[in-house]
Image: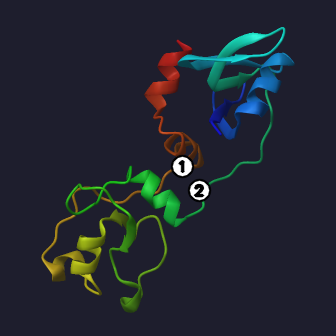
Amino acid sequence: MRETLVLNAGFEPLATVSLRRAVVLVLQDKAVVERAHPGLRVRASAVEMPVPQVIRLCRYVRVPFRQRAPWSRRGVLVRDRHRCAYCGQRATTVDHVVPRAHGGQDTWLNTVAACAADNHRKADRTPEQAGMRLLSRPFEPTPADSLLLALGLDERDWLTAVA
């Protein structure tokens, strides 16, 4: 099922919802479609509308401030766009820059996406010890970045759709 990004009235990302929930919010005039999937439409007996990719709430919703995005293996793969941090090929695993055997933790700044071959080649060593170089440095995404990355969007994508 398709996921839809929900923006607050002030255009800050809030969450992702199912296509069904997004359509209900739009039909109840609680949200407006800011960006739709090109060429796709939802049809019912009395209604036809574009399939929403990004919707914006009509009223501002106050949400508790969340300072950090929770770490997860899936989150690391999405953050790195499923590309190996060592060779740039398709990544299927998560590698610890400082191995867990040497005290490395499951944190955003210590984990990168890696292909199985490079993960195996690096083993229980640091990249320097293994003679491997990181193509990009790991970073900690904000909660808003996490939502956008999970949908395959970046900030420019949904800001240009709104303008």
| Residue occupying image coordinates x 55% and y 64% | 71
Q: Is residue 22 left or right of residue 151?
A: right
| Residue occupying image coordinates x 52% and y 25% | 158
Residue 1 appears in the picture as rendered: yes
The local crowd at label 2, few if under 14, some if 14 to 19, many if 20 or more residues have their Cα within 10 Å, is some
Q: Which mark, residue 96?
A: none
Q: Position of residue 61 (x, y in %)?
A: 80, 33
* Secondary structure state at the residue bearing disc 1: loop
Identify whether 41 is placed above or below 112.
Answer: above
| Residue occupying image coordinates x 12% and y 76% | 131
Residue 138, quarter of picture:
bottom left
Mark 2, residue position? 69
Residue type at mark 1 is Thr
Q: Which mark, residue 142?
A: 1
Q: Is residue 50 left or right of residue 28?
A: left
Indicate which disc, 1 or 2, sits on the residue closer to the N terminus: 2
Query: Which of the two residues, 148 or 62, is positioned nearer the viewer here?
Result: 148
Q: Is residue 62 left or right of residue 69?
A: right
* Secondary structure state at the residue bearing disc 2: loop
